[in-house]
Image (cartoon, coloured by chain):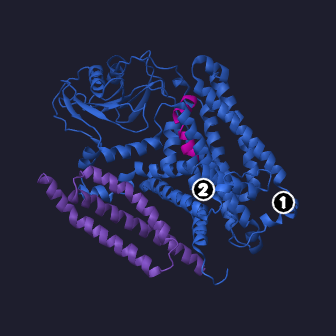
Chain colours: A blue, B purple
């Protein structure tokens, strides 16, 4: 490195490298869990066999199917709610507080009105999806803030990536898989980056926009003098009123749902109903509109008086609010459109490939130099990269297998079945880090083989524990279970191919002689041209 | 060692200082817009918050490659102080005009 000041492109290249190396692991975890979350409800069906029901009947009665259950199980005066079945969720999901004050959520079979036994798992919606935006680090909201930082870093990486990528149009059409790892990784990195650029950028920005009131709170704090209730009432139409502390009765909820659907117009459906202060004279019934036919997370809601059914409040979003809801909807993917959902899944995979190849490029370009100079960088980053990329996949597969193998009601030292599944995830993940630290470069191959073995094992575990092998699942009217098995099998196949290829590639001396130009790198040099 | 310090210092200044500037600017915008236009408070808050992320990205793209350290510190520090000052002093004014039905 001479005394010549680096060019702007070189400076942005350094920014890209540093941001990528420091946050690449976190970014992969976020993108991987996010990609899985596209199918979180489908994963729920796989992990909760009791909810593998065919499509719900069109006519749902909350009065007949939910209220008796609430009367039986819930603390009478506490708030309760019910999410109505959708195309992707064939059950009613009821949430209430029980006699001991514990928050409970139960799936209900809509055709019989009976509660489904507690499945003893958090599933896709309870573990995988929250991991995506919170990393399960709740202490001081650290997880949320780390994800926020990663989101900003993602946008920075994308913009700097474009800036340093000179031949962006020519490289669009280049992928050389037979070349040594570093060259083909770079091709794949550029391809995944350029092809998915609008998607990756929009996912990062929209993710941040969802949490604007957490990440940019001084806007509403300044405008509303810190009054959060006034802010949410104004911006999201949240309505609440204090209890009168006098007894009251609750009228027909079905009638209120019907009234709400009438007000919203032809073809609109309710998605969610919440009852506040149910036994009070000032009870409030909130009916939320389903946005499953649109991208936007519109969340329009109507509030009724529980006893008389009188309209208390409606909410219609204003223009800028509709933009924020649309951006949120782009990220949340709660719409009913399979083609679009699969495109999101493929987009997510391209993001995972982008981040993983980025880490690989850095490792391969620094490996020789760091070994020569006795630097720890490659060893540390490699350990993180291996546990972040194949490692988290191994842990997730172990999570799925534990879900199918743990007996119902299993418990160790007051950790329930759902907690035990999470323990399996974290212990296995730690194991992959240990493997990465001890075995260094060979760990990539170790874990590729592990994935190749665990993925079909998960399919087998499902078959043995539920009898729902793919053909039977299709027969029973739950094709999503077959879909999950198919994706697991595909993952196993790709891992097998990768492991074989990594096994062949571990003859570095010969390939180094053949392509010295690629493997010999200047210190700190990136070959993005 | 000196290089490591320089890199870490630049990163910290960019991430924290950039955040302070973006947060300050978005807060000032959120309070000013309803005072100078007919945009409702809730709309202004949403618009300013969403723009805040874009502003942060642009600030990062500048700070991370700007060689003039004094300029960076002046813009980030001064800008954050100035804009949050504006937000702080205009906030009660906005509350008063809203109460008056303004």
Magenta highlight: main SS: helix
Residue shown at the point (77%, 55%) measured from the top left: A442
Residue position for label 2: A25
Please state the chain letter of the residue tagged with numbered disc 1 in the rendered image: A
Among numbered discs 2 and 1, the one appearing first in the sequence: 2
Q: Quadrant of residue A495?
A: top right
Query: In the visual, does A510 lie left or right of A200?
Result: right
Query: In the visual, does A334 lie left or right of A288?
Result: right
The crowd level at tag 2 (other Cα within 10 Å; few <14, some 14-19, many 20+) is many
Residue shown at the point (22%, 60%) measured from the top left: B36
Q: Quadrant of the C terminus of chain A?
A: bottom right
Q: Is residue A59 magenta?
A: no
Residue shown at the point (59%, 52%) measured from the top left: A28
Q: Is residue A387 visible?
A: no
Q: Position of residue A6 (x, y in %)?
A: 60, 77
Q: Quadrant of residue A27?
A: bottom right
Q: Position of residue A36 (x, y in %)?
A: 57, 40
Query: In the visual, does A305 lie left or right of B64?
Result: left
Q: Position of residue A135 (x, y in %)?
A: 51, 50
Counting labels gives: 2
Q: Quadrant of the N terminus of chain A?
A: bottom right
Query: In the visual, does A136 lie left or right of A438?
Result: left
Q: In the image shown, does A145 or A31 lie closer to the viewer?
A: A31
**Of helix, strand and loop, which one carries label 1?**
helix
Tell me if residue A275 comes above or below residue A24 in the rendering: above
Tell me if residue A385 comes above or below residue A79 in the rendering: below
Q: Is residue A34 magenta?
A: yes
Q: Is residue B55 visible?
A: yes
Segment colored magenta: A32-46
Residue position for label 1: A508
Q: In the image shown, does A434 or A154 lie closer to the viewer?
A: A154
Q: Position of residue A192 (x, y in %)?
A: 63, 50
């Amino acid at each position: 490195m001479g005394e010549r000041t680096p060019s702007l492109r070189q400076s942005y290249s350094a920014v890209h490298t540093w941001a990528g190396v420091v946050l690449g692991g976190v970014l992969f975890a976020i993108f991987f869990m996010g990609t899985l979350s596209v199918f979180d409800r489908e994963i729920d069906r796989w992990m909760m066999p009791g909810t593998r029901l065919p499509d719900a009947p069109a006519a749902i009665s909350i009065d007949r199917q939910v209220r008796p259950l609430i009367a039986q199980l819930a603390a009478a005066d506490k708030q309760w709610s019910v999410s109505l079945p959708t195309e992707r969720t064939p059950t009613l999901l009821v949430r209430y507080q029980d006699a001991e004050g514990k928050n409970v959520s139960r799936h209900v079979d809509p055709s019989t009105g009976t509660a489904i036994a507690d499945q003893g798992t958090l599933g896709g919606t309870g573990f995988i999806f929250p991991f995506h935006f919170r990393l399960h680090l709740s202490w001081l909201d650290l997880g949320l803030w780390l994800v926020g930082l990663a989101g900003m870093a993602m946008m920075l990486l994308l913009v700097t990536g474009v800036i340093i990528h000179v031949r962006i149009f020519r490289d669009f059409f280049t992928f050389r898989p037979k070349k040594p790892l570093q060259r083909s990784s770079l091709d794949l990195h550029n391809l995944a980056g350029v092809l998915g650029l609008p998607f990756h950028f929009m996912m990062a920005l929209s993710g941040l926009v969802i949490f604007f009131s957490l990440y940019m709170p001084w806007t509403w704090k300044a405008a509303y003098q810190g009054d959060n209730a006034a802010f949410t009432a104004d911006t999201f139409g949240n309505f609440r009123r204090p209890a009168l502390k006098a007894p009251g009765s609750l009228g027909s909820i079905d009638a209120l749902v019907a009234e709400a659907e009438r007000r919203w117009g032809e073809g609109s459906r309710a998605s969610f109903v919440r009852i506040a202060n149910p036994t009070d004279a000032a009870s409030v019934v909130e009916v939320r509109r389903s946005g499953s036919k649109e991208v936007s997370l519109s969340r329009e809601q109507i509030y009724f008086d529980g006893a008389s059914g009188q309209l208390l409040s409606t909410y219609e979003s204003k223009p800028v609010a509709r933009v924020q809801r649309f951006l949120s909807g782009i990220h949340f993917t709660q719409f009913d459109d399979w083609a679009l959902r699969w495109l999101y899944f493929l987009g997510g995979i391209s993001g995972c490939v982008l981040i993983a190849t980025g880490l690989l490029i850095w490792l391969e370009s620094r490996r020789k130099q760091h070994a020569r100079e006795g630097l720890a960088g490659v060893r540390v980053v490699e350990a993180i990269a291996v546990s972040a990329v194949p490692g988290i996949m191994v842990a997730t597969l172990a999570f799925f297998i534990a879900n199918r193998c743990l007996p119902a009601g299993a418990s160790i030292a007051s950790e329930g079945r759902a907690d035990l599944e999470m323990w399996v995830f974290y212990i296995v993940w730690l194991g992959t880090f240990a493997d990465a630290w001890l075995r260094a470069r060979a760990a990539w191959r170790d874990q590729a083989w592990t994935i190749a073995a665990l993925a079909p094992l998960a399919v087998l575990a499902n078959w043995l524990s539920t009898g729902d092998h793919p053909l039977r699942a299709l027969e029973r009217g739950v094709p999503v279970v077959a879909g999950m098995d198919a994706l697991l099998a595909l993952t196993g196949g790709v891992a097998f191919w990768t492991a074989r290829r990594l096994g062949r590639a571990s003859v570095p001396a010969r390939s180094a002689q053949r392509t010295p130009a690629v493997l010999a790198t200047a210190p700190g040099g990136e070959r993005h041209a | 060692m000196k290089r490591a310090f320089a890199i870490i210092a630049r990163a910290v200044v960019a991430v924290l200082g950039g955040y302070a500037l973006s947060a300050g600017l978005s807060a000032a915008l959120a309070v000013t817009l309803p005072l100078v236009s007919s945009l409702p408070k809730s709309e202004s808050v949403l618009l300013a918050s969403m723009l805040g992320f874009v502003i942060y990205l642009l600030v990062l793209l500048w700070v991370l490659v700007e060689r003039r350290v004094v300029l960076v510190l002046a813009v980030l520090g001064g800008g954050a102080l100035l804009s949050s000052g504006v937000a702080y002093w205009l906030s009660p004014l906005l509350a008063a005009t809203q109460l008056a039905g303004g």
